[in-house]
Image (tube, rainbow, N blue to C red):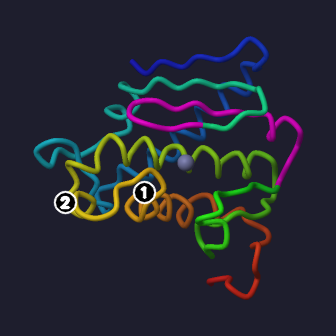
Amino acid sequence: MGLIYKSKNVTTAERDLVKRLTKQCLKEIVKSKWEITGPRSEKLTVAKVWDKLYLKVKCRGQASYGGKNYMCIDVSQYRKGRTFQHEYARIKNDPIIGEGTFATPEDALMLIVAHEVAHLIHDNYFIYTRWLREGDNTPHGKNWQKIYRILRREIVNKNMVKDVDPEKKVA
Ligand SMILES: [Zn+2]
């Protein structure tokens, strides 16, 4: 069973929101068409990933984190009603995985969740996945970016209202 823990100052509504957004990302990324697999090419399911996950929700104005079987999401920006979400310098100007403004604070929070789910999936499965095994497997490297790109394109960016650089906008 997946474990979800919230800090005292996080509401149950915020916790449940993060849980729902996390599951939405997992539902997308386990689809067969993305060919991300477990050991011996085993097909992933939401339950398989979720059951091993320890998900923590905090509100401290700190960074969020994602890694092997672990995610920690900070909801401070969401609570403040922020709709702009930053990304790391290395990717912030990328037309797909860069930073941007979203329709609602929940949509901006989805960017954070997708970013950390990409770390979770990358750390858990890159060594088992044919198309991820080789190449740059550093924390924000090319292979992590490929996973994040899927989540951004299929889910997060659908609610993006403005890219950082409109010239780079891809239809
Ligand atoms: Zn990261």
Q: How far from the left and from the top, in percent, is residue 76?
A: 80, 34
For label 2, being within 8 Å of ligand 1 is answered no
Q: Secondary structure at mark 2?
A: loop
Residue identified by numbered label 1: 144
Residue 47 rendering spot, x and y as whole percentages: 36, 32
Q: What span is in magenta?
A: 65-83
Tell me the SS state at disc 1: helix
Q: Amino acid at mark 1?
A: Trp
Position of 1 with respect to 58 (left or right) is left
Q: Which residue is mark 2?
A: 130
Q: Position of residue 162 (x, y in %)?
A: 79, 71
Q: Is residue 84 left or right of residue 31?
A: right
Residue 163 lies in what quarter of the image? bottom right
Tell me if 170 is positioned left or right of 53 in this view. right
Q: Residue at x 58, y 30 (%)?
A: 72
Judging depth in this view, the residue of 128 and 49 nearest the camera is 128
Residue 155 quadrant? bottom right
Q: Residue furthest right?
A: 80
Does the magenta-highlighted stretch encompass residue 81?
yes
Q: Nearer the viewer, residue 89 or 49?
A: 89
* Sooner in the amino-acid sequence: mark 1 or mark 2: 2
Q: CA distance from mark 1 to mark 2?
A: 14 Å
* Magenta run includes residue 171: no
Report the front residue among 1 and 97.
97
- Check the picture and name the quadrant holding the C terminus: bottom right
Say which residue appears at 22% left-offset and 57% top-offset.
Answer: 133
Residue 132 placement: quadrant: bottom left
x, y percentage for residue 110? 65, 48
Q: At x 44% / y 37%, what residue is drawn?
A: 67
Quarter containing the N terminus:
top left
